[in-house]
Image (cartoon, helix red, strand yellow):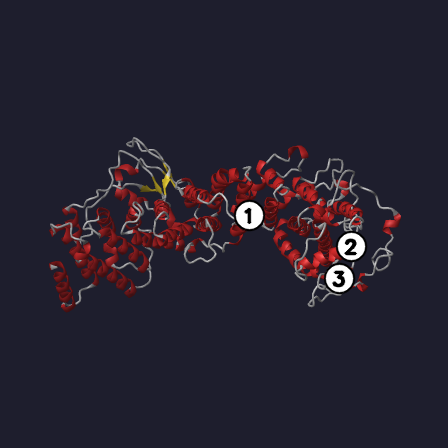
Amino acid sequence: MFSKFTSILQHAVEALAPSLPLQEDFVYHWKAITHYYIETSDDKAPVTDTNIPSHLEQMLDILVQEENERESGETGPCMEYLLHHKILETLYTLGKADCPPGMKQQVLVFYTKLLGRIRQPLLPHVNVHRPVQKLIRLCGEVLATPTENEEIQFLCIVCAKLKQDPYLVNFFLENKLKSLAYKGVPTVISEDTLKGQDSLSTDTGQSHQPEELSGAAGMERAELEDECPHHMDDLSTSLDNLTVTSLPEASVVRPNQDYNLVNSLLNLTRSPDGRIAVKACEGLMLLVSLPEPAAAKCLTQSTCLCELLTDRLASLYKALPQSVDPLDIETVEAINWGLDSYSHKEDASAFPGKRALISFLSWFDYCDQLIKEAQKTAAVALAKAVHERFFIGVMEPQLMQTSEMGILTSTALLHRIVRQVTSDVLLQEMVFFILGEQREPETLAEISRHPLRHRLIEHCDHISDEISIMTLRMFEHLLQKPNEHILYNLVLRNLEERNYTEYKPLCPEDKDVVENGLIAGAVDLEEDPLFTDISPDNTLSNQEWLSSPPTTPDHPKNDGKTEVHKIVNSFLCLVPDEAKSSYHVEGTGYDTYLRDAHRQFRDYCAICLRWEWPGSPKALEKCNLEAAFFEGHFLKVLFDRMGRILDQPYDVNLQVTSVLSRLSLFPHPHIHEYLLDPYVNLASGCRSLFSVIVRVVGDLMVRIQRIQDFTPKLLLVRKRLLGLEPEGPIIDHITLLEGVIVLEEFCKELAAIAFVKYHASSTS
């Protein structure tokens, strides 16, 4: 009570007293603080019962006022006093001792406001960055302390300053010198020290032996000599790799560095207070993005950042229930790592494990964003850690298990993170995890070379339809990711030599081209209602769309591009008329696929633009056509499933054809030739997508004869699928009838894709 009265009286006296010059006023407030420690005998009274907080606030106000009154960049006498008399060092020591109780909080607030309110760069000063380093080490030592909020505010203002001037981070990369030669800074300030601070003299005579030497570029040698002149001659500092050579006096020297700013933030990410943890994550996000190579190296090699990311991913993944409905995993709302707040009571769509799922996906999103923002070498190191410690260490055993429920849940989670990942570097590691790094052509004997790839592709043809559909969907989304290795590993590496073709020189009649550039006897597509404009805003006439590219010596007519009308008609006519039902239902014509194909092809071209694919197939003369052809494990499974389209469930067929149509959209000439050209001369024993469909149609023609009222039943099934007819009695041969409908629609889709791709190549 008495101290509060004293404080009020002091404020009254200060208000009535004539204003002093700023420097005298500043020194007065600092003396008042130091005198408290000299004169007081009660060191257990909380700091809030003293005048210390008021004096510190006054000192800050004076420093801000001084800066505002001077020209930009000019250091005033008050700031000079603060720097020269090592006031921040003294405050750090008082804060570390927390004397009086609550002093640590006051010191943190003072440092935070000083760095935040003073515009001139302070961190380059040795008497600022050194105590700041030391104070950083006090942060996050104990979780859930009363000072946690002040600690995170202080750390974040330091991070913000480093983001403004990234080179300053070098002051915070500390070489660990575990040496007997260094005694360390005393943790208790002596009365003589405080008396020495009272003098306005520039020579304080105070010299502290440092706990560490910064290996930072930019720290002046003179400042180091000031601090420890008897060691300076023996100390050789390499600014390139930031390591310290051995000291003669030291019994143990460890050259690896401390990045205490990162370590303190890592500790605070474990805070039970979610707001503190999020702020710590934001601070780490700022630090990993700094462009300084030395900081990036220290970040990944000398801190536990990689371990934090991966260990938490692992623990959150393991906390998930053994079985979660795949639909719940797919449809749970988009996760933003900074907004991971979920209340089970307020959620009408809650399901068992939702809280754990959101936590896992939220942390994965944070890892993804962190790697996306990180400096290049740091990003690679972090992504490799996630690959080795989480993907391989935790996810792979789950994906390789034999329990159907476990396979389904783990594949659904893999599908979700494939969709969610946005960092190119993390995506690359994820692709290597799923597919391996192999780029040479596959052989049937070695399809299990990368066990996880082999297992996942086998799951596309699993006895469980749910597992097949989920795995196919995962591959479908993987194919949409902007990574060249995905398509190359799954398909392209097996098509490089075009050894699926049999080379036959052109006969004279094959070169018989009529004057308008189309093969003699071709259907006039301009008159065909199926070949109306793709969309109302299409400004090109049909004839322009369908005109063949000019023949040149470099691109003769046998360049693998069969005339578009022949390709389109081939696919549209594959299914016989008696097995077609779409013309009975309005709005299911071929033209509806043109719009989708046009949009999707444009999107795929944008993805593949930087991969520099060739515009035309590799010349057959340069191909190794003698090599045995294997379409690869992925296409083998897809073709096998396509061959069973009449005997598979409707949902499986939709997913198989969806993946094949995605593959067909890629603007690579070999993919186009192999999947979309019915007239390619297949080598003996080889199959293509078109040849697989031809076999299915042959089987269909035989089976149609055995089904009574085939056409009416087919039409009824189509109308039920479209919701135009209510569900009624079960129809015989329902699987086959649904398969025929999918087959017809798939052929129309392939025709549309071929047409759109041809148009794009002829107008480019």
Query: Which mark is first along the chain, 2 or 1?
Result: 1
Residue 528 visible in the picture = yes
Give residue 400's position: percent from left, percent from top: 55, 37
**Hey, which quadrant is residue 757 in on the image?**
bottom right
Mark 1 highlights which residue? 415
Q: Is residue 575 left or right of residue 492?
A: right
| Nearer the observer, 502 or 119 | 502
Q: Are marks 1 and 2 in contact (CB under 8 Å)?
A: no
At label 1, the amino acid type is His
Q: Is residue 733 left or right of residue 172?
A: right
At label 2, the amino acid type is Asp
| Mark 2 closeness class: few <14, some 14–19, many ≥20 residues within 10 Å | few
At label 3, the amino acid type is His
| Nearer the observer, 318 or 130 | 318
Q: Which mark is residue 123?
A: none
* Total number of numbered discs in the rendering: 3
- Which type of secondary structure does the marked residue at label 3 adopt? helix
Mark 3 highlights which residue? 584
Single out the mark in the foreground, 2 or 3. 2
- Which type of secondary structure does the marked residue at label 2 adopt? loop
Mark 2 highlights which residue? 709
Q: Is residue 384 left or right of residue 3?
A: right
Residue 756 visible in the picture = no
Give residue 616's position: percent from left, percent from top: 72, 49
Single out the mark in the foreground, 1 or 2. 2
| Mark 3 closeness class: few <14, some 14–19, many ≥20 residues within 10 Å | few
How far apart in space, not on screen, are marks 2 and 3 (Cα)? Answer: 16 Å
